[in-house]
């Protein structure tokens, strides 16, 4: 009996233990199931986050790719689209009430540009057709529709075929696209040809189905700053003639170059603007303009400053020396008083009495005036330029040679600045002007000596004739070609090679004229005479069909001047028909994700 009771008690205890074990097993199973479920959920979330992050990265890349395609199109050397860098293209915000208005200037067929005859007909076409504007995707016939059509980015699949899908996820394609939300020009300096703009480009990722439906899964907005540069890409597009008031007789440009007509009024058409102007032996084609109307001021003599060395009185007074040349008879010549009887006379800038300068040859018998290197700008004989101030020059039978290189001194260029005398111009024979007529000649020369006749230099960049920028308005007016002050008058070969920087003055022809060089003047007055302007040192190079770009630049007077005067350090990129290019700016890219 005792044994039976013991066995029964033991059986009950075992049953209880089995129940506890089962309970523990069930609890363990619940814990394992919960852990597995949590792990699975975490993995699913991580996968979704990874997919979303992948889509957002794709959207970022689509925005970058889209920007590069827009920039590549605008910078395409075979298309003239650089003008778009100067036009806003997006919504304009009113700061007073935060309202917006359309300012999509790229969509205007004839935008307001300072180079009036810019060809705007080659505007890119949207990939989806002409019904949408490139690259914003705005609908042409329904601009009030806020819905736009992005430009799809195509790629090449494994079979070498073009596809719009970047990849396939779960039987659905991943399609990247982009659109320009806005472009705004921040600043642009026409004188330096530099500016800044900012782009906002959207990158969009859609999942596509076989039935053509699309679901947007990611979108990113990239903001990128851009540096804008204008340049003149070839000598044929440089202005070798430029003026506001134009009165040309039969005029021929020999070699590469065009005429810039500075005007505030857009011409009615851009063909045959100046019928008497033509161009020969040039690398230009019939598609290249000969006359380029432009709403811009002429470059000034600041381009020819060099190291700024002025011709001063050799007595070390530091005062500028004012020159006066006149070879006419006493009754007709300028009144320089009784203290100077030679053709060349000088005075100090704060005095009215003249004296005969100490120069190599006054040309009393030879009719040749010779000024050596070390007789001018004596305060700095190794200067790279000598600025000489001329209140009057009227030569009819005298040749004037100014030495640009000395035997022991460094080469330097010569700039003749027109200035007004201290008394009324008529009193000194039309002061503030240069008149070269008859057998007279004005040249720089590499070498000047007393015993021989110098040879005229053939480099226009070595002799600059600059107008005065501070003429007294009571004494002169450049409103007509009849005004004699602040004027250079030439004929024949009296000025063989020179650069006339007459932004505030006029150039007059008193006879048929030949000139190697460039004329930039407020007024060009031909008086019906012929002008043959040679813009290159070797026209056979510009006329040859097989000449490369570097060979043409090497014979161009404008490129020679740019190099001689270091215009790159002045950020001067040229005057004429410009080309604009955009480069990535210094600002950091910013991305917004949606």
Image (cartoon, helix red, strand yellow):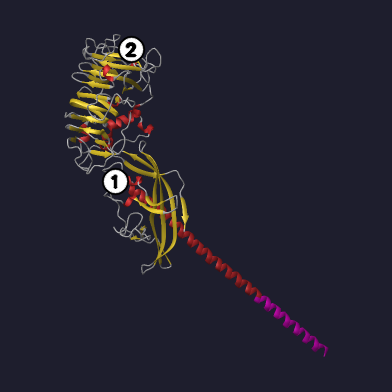
How many neighbours does mark 1 have within 10 angstroms: few (below 14), some (14-19), or many (20 or more)?
A: some
- Residue range of the region highlighted in magenta in the rendering: 1-26
- The percent position of residue 544, horizontal first and vertical second, equals 20, 36
- Figure quadrant of the N terminus: bottom right
Tell which residue pokes out farthest to the right in this image. 2
- The percent position of residue 532, horizontal first and vertical second, equals 19, 29
Does residue 446 show up?
no
Q: Earlier in the sequence, mark 2 or mark 1?
A: 1
Q: Is mark 2 on a helix, strand or loop?
A: loop
Toward which corner of the image does residue 484 lie, by quadrant?
A: top left
Q: Main secondary structure of the magenta part?
A: helix
* Residue 10 drawn above or below residue 493: below
Tell which residue pokes out farthest to the front in this image. 474
Toward which corner of the image does residue 178 lie, by quadrant?
A: bottom left
Q: Camera-side residue: 429 or 368?
A: 429
**Residue 77 among magenta residues:** no
39 left or right of 464 in image: right
| Residue placed under numbered mark 1 in the picture | 80
Q: In percent of the image, x 35 and y 47: which residue is there?
A: 87
Q: Is mark 1 on a helix, strand or loop?
A: loop
């Amino acid at each position: 009996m005792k044994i039976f009771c013991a066995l029964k008690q033991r059986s009950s205890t075992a049953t209880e233990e089995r129940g506890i074990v089962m309970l523990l097993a069930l609890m363990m199973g619940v814990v394992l199931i919960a852990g597995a479920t949590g792990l699975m959920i975490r993995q699913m979330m991580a996968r979704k986050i990874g997919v979303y992050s992948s889509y957002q990265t794709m959207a970022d890349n689509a925005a970058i790719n889209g920007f590069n395609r827009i920039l590549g199109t605008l910078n395409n050397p075979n298309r003239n689209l650089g003008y778009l860098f100067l036009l806003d293209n997006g919504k304009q915000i009113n700061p007073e009430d935060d309202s917006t208005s359309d300012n999509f200037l790229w969509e205007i067929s004839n935008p307001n540009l300072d180079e009036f005859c810019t060809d705007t007909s080659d505007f890119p076409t949207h990939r989806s057709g002409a019904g949408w504007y490139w690259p914003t995707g705005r609908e042409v016939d329904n601009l009030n529709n806020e819905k736009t059509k992005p430009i799809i980015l195509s790629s090449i699949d494994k079979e070498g075929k073009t596809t719009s899908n970047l990849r396939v996820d779960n039987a659905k394609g991943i399609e990247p696209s982009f659109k320009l939300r806005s472009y705004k020009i921040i600043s642009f300096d026409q004188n330096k040809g530099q500016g800044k703009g900012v782009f906002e480009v959207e990158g969009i990722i859609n999942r596509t189905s076989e039935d053509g439906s699309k679901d947007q899964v990611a979108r990113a907005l990239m903001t990128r700053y851009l540096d804008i540069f204008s340049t003149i890409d070839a000598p044929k597009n440089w202005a070798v003639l430029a003026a506001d008031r134009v009165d040309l007789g039969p005029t021929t440009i020999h070699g590469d170059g065009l005429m810039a007509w500075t005007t505030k009024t857009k011409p009615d058409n851009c063909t045959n603007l100046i019928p008497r102007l033509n161009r020969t032996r040039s690398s230009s084609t019939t598609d290249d303009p000969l006359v380029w109307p432009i709403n811009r001021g002429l470059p000034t003599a600041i381009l020819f400053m060099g190291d700024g060395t002025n011709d001063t009185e050799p007595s070390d007074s530091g005062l500028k020396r004012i020159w006066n040349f006149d070879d006419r008879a006493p009754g007709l010549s300028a009144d320089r008083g009784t203290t100077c009887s030679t053709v060349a006379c000088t005075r100090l800038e704060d005095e009215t009495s003249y004296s005969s300068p100490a120069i190599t040859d006054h040309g009393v018998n030879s009719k040749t005036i010779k000024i050596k290197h070390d007789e001018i700008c004596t305060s700095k004989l190794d200067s790279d330029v000598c600025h000489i101030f001329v209140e009057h020059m009227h030569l009819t039978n005298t040749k004037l040679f100014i030495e640009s290189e000395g035997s022991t001194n460094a080469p330097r260029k010569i700039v003749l600045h027109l200035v007004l005398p201290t008394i009324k111009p008529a009193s000194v024979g039309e002061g503030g002007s240069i008149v070269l007529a008859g057998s007279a000649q004005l040249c720089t020369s590499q070498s000047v000596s007393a015993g021989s006749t110098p040879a005229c230099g053939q480099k226009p960049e070595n002799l600059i004739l600059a107008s005065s920028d501070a003429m007294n308005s009571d004494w002169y007016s450049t409103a007509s070609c009849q005004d004699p002050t602040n004027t250079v008058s030439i004929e024949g070969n009296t000025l063989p090679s020179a650069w006339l920087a007459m932004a505030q003055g006029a150039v007059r022809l008193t006879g048929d004229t030949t000139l190697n060089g460039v004329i930039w003047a407020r007024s060009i007055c031909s008086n019906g005479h012929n002008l043959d302007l040679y813009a290159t040192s070797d026209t056979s190079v510009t006329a040859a069909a097989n000449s490369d770009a570097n060979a043409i630049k090497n014979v161009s007077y404008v490129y020679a001047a740019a190099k001689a005067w270091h215009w790159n350090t002045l950020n001067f990129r040229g005057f004429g028909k410009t080309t604009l290019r955009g480069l990535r700016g210094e600002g950091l890219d910013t991305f917004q994700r949606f």
